[in-house]
Image (cartoon, rainbow, N blue to C red):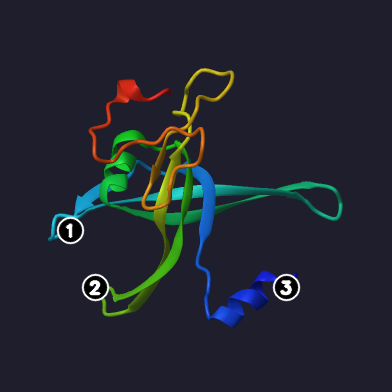
Amino acid sequence: MQPIASLLGKIGMNLNKVFVLGRLTADPQLRSTTTGQQVASFGLATNRVWYDKNKQKQEATEFHNIVVWGRQAEVASQFLVKGSLVLIEGRLQTRNWDDKQGQKRRTTEIIAERLQLGPRPGSSGGAAPREKTVEASAPPAEEIPVINVDEEIKSEDLPF
């Protein structure tokens, strides 16, 4: 069996796919573009834990900028708050711009293609409730309820 890099190289494809599981650093900010498209952005913190050569526990936190478009932006704005646990599936995108002082600026963001909401912060202990999934284009995974983006979402319909 050939390594995936070899196969992808032969068919001329690249892969830009990111999965991050973390907690929001602030409430999502929902905006509309001039064409009426909804967009939400928020920060996400992910933690890494490892043990060094002296067997001492080490921890590091990474911060990610997340951008969500369309109906998923509305869902994120409605159901996510600072501290919420969320799984993001998306792609990396880098933007360039000139700031007010004329300096070249650059940022890399994760453009969310799929959100999976975790339990609400501060929910009671015990087993975590089943998660709701909102997807951009892929079919839902089996046994995971899907939020129909064509219907209004009511908080009483959510299991958490």
Q: Residues within 10 Å of mark 3 (few under 14, many from 20)?
A: few
Q: Quadrant of residue 158?
A: top left
| Number of numbered tags placed on the structure image | 3
Amino acid type, callout 2: Lys
Residue placed under numbered mark 2 in the picture: 100
Task: Look at mark 3 in the image and give the residue it sits on.
Answer: 2
Q: Position of residue 61 (x, y in %)?
A: 58, 51
Nearer the observer, 159 or 5: 5
| Mark 2 residue element | loop
- The disc labelled 3 sits on which kind of residue? Gln
Tag in front: 1 or 3: 3
Q: CA distance from mark 2 to mark 3?
A: 50 Å
Above or below 104: residue 76: above
Contact between marks 1 and 3 (CB within 8 A): the answer is no
The label nearer to you, 2 versus 1, is: 1
> Is the residue marked by circle 2 packed among few (<14), some (14-19), or many (20+) residues within 10 Å?
few
The percent position of residue 124, horizontal first and vertical second, equals 51, 18
Question: Residue at left 56%, top 18%?
Answer: 125
Q: Earlier in the sequence, mark 2 or mark 3?
A: 3
Q: Which residue does the image show at 39% across and 36% down from the upper left?
A: 146
* Disc assigned to residue 101: none
Residue 143, image x, y percentages: 51, 32
Answer with mark 2 or mark 1, whichever residue precedes in sequence: 1
Of pointers 1 and 3, the one earlier in the residue sequence: 3
Residue nearest the viewer, comparing 53 with 84: 84
* Quadrant of the snapshot with the C terminus: top left
Q: Quadrant of the N terminus?
A: bottom right
Q: Which mark is residue 33?
A: 1
What's the distance in space between the residues labelled 2 and 1, CA to CA? 21 Å
Question: At 42% across and 45% down in the image, what residue appears?
Answer: 115
